[in-house]
Image (cartoon, grey):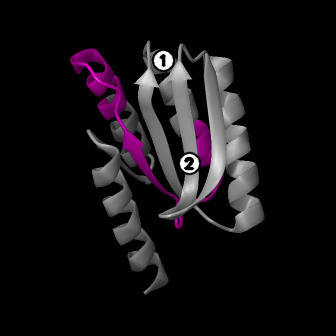
Amino acid sequence: MGTSVRLLDDPVCIEARYFGDVTPADLITALDDVFALAREEDLWLILADTSELTSDPSVFALYDVAAQIADAGVARRFREAVVAPPGAASADSARFFEDAMVNRGLVARVFGSRGAAETWLCGQARGLSA
């Protein structure tokens, strides 16, 4: 049903929210919006909150998103924390996405809560600035 992308102050990152039923086209639009904002702000810390999804994107759509991120040439600075949607099947989809990202040399982790995702992302920010 929808996506939104915005800059957050605390933690300093780009938030991509996914809610309702999201189509593969919605995923690509959100990714384009994330990349546009990331380039504008020179900020590659991404908080992807999928906790309000009502259906899971297909593994093909998730694979395609991971491939597009890898092809963007931002792996050195890109960090993504994903807040998984509730439910066992959704958690499996989120873990598939994490594996697809890591297999492409990207740093991404899936979390069951937003707080844990934010804490990890803050730690990643400190590691990048050291």
Q: Amino acid at mark 1?
A: Pro
Q: Residue at x 46, y 76 (%)?
A: 128
Query: Which mark's residue is nearer the viewer, 2 or 1?
Result: 2
Q: Residue at x 48, y 42 (%)?
A: 48
Q: Bin the neighbour count of mark 2 within 10 Å (Cα to Cα): few under 14, some 14-19, many 20 and up.
A: many
Residue highlighted by disc 2? 15
Q: Secondary structure at mark 1?
A: loop
Q: Quadrant of residue 26?
A: top right
Q: Secondary structure at mark 2?
A: strand
Q: Amino acid at mark 2?
A: Glu
Q: Residue at x 72, y 54 (%)?
A: 37
Residue highlighted by disc 1? 57
Magenta region:
67-95
Whether 127 is drawn above or below 70: the answer is: below
Viewer-closest of 74 and 23 = 23
Can you give x and y, in whole percent of width and height, for residue 6 in the image?
65, 49
Q: Quadrant of the C terminus?
A: bottom left
Disc nearer the start of the sequence (2/1): 2
Tell me the CA gap for discs 2 and 1: 19 Å
